[in-house]
Image: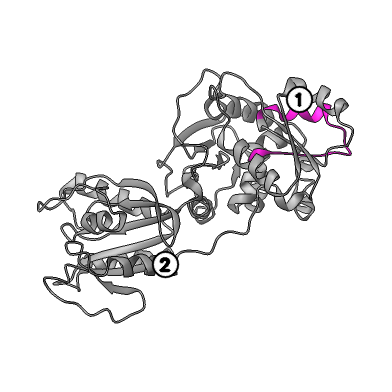
Amino acid sequence: MGLNDTPVAERIHIGFFGRRNAGKSSVVNAIAGQEVAVVSEKKGTTTDPVSKTMELLPLGPVVIIDTPGYDDDEEVLGEKRILRTKKILNRSDIAVLVTDSADTSDRYDSELIGIFKEKKIPYIIVYNKCDLSPAAAEADNEIAVSALTGDGINALKELLGAFAPAPSERRIAGSLIEKNDVVILVTPIDESAPKGRMILPQVQTIRDILDSDAICVTVKETELEKALSSLAVKPKLVITDSQAFSYVSAIVPDDIELTSFSILMAKYKGFLDSAVRGAAFLKNLRDGDTVLIAEGCTHHRQCNDIGTVKIPRLLKKYTGRQINIKTCSGNEFPEDLSPYAAVIHCGACMLSEREMLYRMKCAQDSKVPFTNYGITIALANGILRRSLGVFPELQKIVTE
């Protein structure tokens, strides 16, 4: 990703669904103006979801996702493809159902529409191949196009713009600071830090602070004390990587607000309240309970990885219990969370707000506590109340 690129999690995700050979891939290519997906007369050519990040007017930065045919029922393999298609819906902001104009009534299409409604996803029905068999669009969310001739494609782009979700008003740190405030970011550089660059939440937070016309100072944890003594003005806020919470908390005076990137990302993604409530149940874990530690991205595991090493070690020390740990990453997140006593999620910088709210709802439906890395680390170190001081409305539900 270039420095000027919009992160995937901040883009509008548009999923294209439908039966095999309805022309999903052809419509995707026509909208994109390039060959995003492989097109063939053979049914089932698309066997795995294909994603493409691009700029699409009038929407702007988007992720277009072409999915396998929903009617692919070739025993076990077909079932897996259908499951993957359903998972794509969990991160789609807009769903596009592509159907053959010659066959506008089909049980698979009806089932997909039912799922769109169940998940409350705005959807558009595209009647493709109108050059062969004209179809009338009767509702506001229906349109007839021809991927072959290009007829209706521009109108479809405009319709997608009309169905796009309104931009989120949430800020990462901007709502906590004012113009000319000094904010210190503490960013440890250890074996898990990407060489030559900073991780996404740090970059996004820096940009958000600059957009607020505030002053951003970035230091390693080992230089924090020197930075504090060197500043002529007391910082309004210190934001730290959660892994350095305990170390940083001991250095930052109590009259300076302190929180973490992970906690701010939970607020930004819309699940901080639930994460704070979920953390309260961690002290009730019992011997033999299984905790799911989930990450939104896939990456090379380091020897002292936070998700597979540091969090499990900290959790067992905090609870004093023999706890079983299971992990998942990327799109592996299970819908059924009933086997778990709790879910601890990463900061979710690589996941959209819709995807995170879906994961949180899966936990709620299974009555499983759901929290995140930063809150768990703050709780285990006895500084959760302090780390949430920037959110006074949450103080009443903090239990330490």
Q: Residues within 10 Å of mark 2 (few under 14, many from 20)?
A: some
**Which residue matches tag 1?**
247
Looking at the picture, which amino acid does disc 2 mark?
Pro
Q: Secondary structure at mark 2?
A: loop
Question: Which is more toward the observer, 249 or 111?
Answer: 249
Q: Residue at x 82, y 42 (%)?
A: 236
Question: Which is more toward the observer, 55 or 379?
Answer: 55
Dividing the image into 4 quarters, which one contains the C terminus?
Answer: top right
Asked if the magenta segment contains residue 249, the reply would be: yes
Q: Position of residue 319 (x, y in %)?
A: 67, 32
Q: Is residue 273 left or right of residue 197?
A: right
Q: Quick one: label 2 or label 1, which is nearer the N terminus?
A: 2
Q: In which image quadrant can residue 217 be found?
A: top right
Q: Secondary structure at mark 1?
A: helix
**Which residue matches tag 2?**
122
Question: Which is more toward the observer, 5 or 360?
Answer: 5
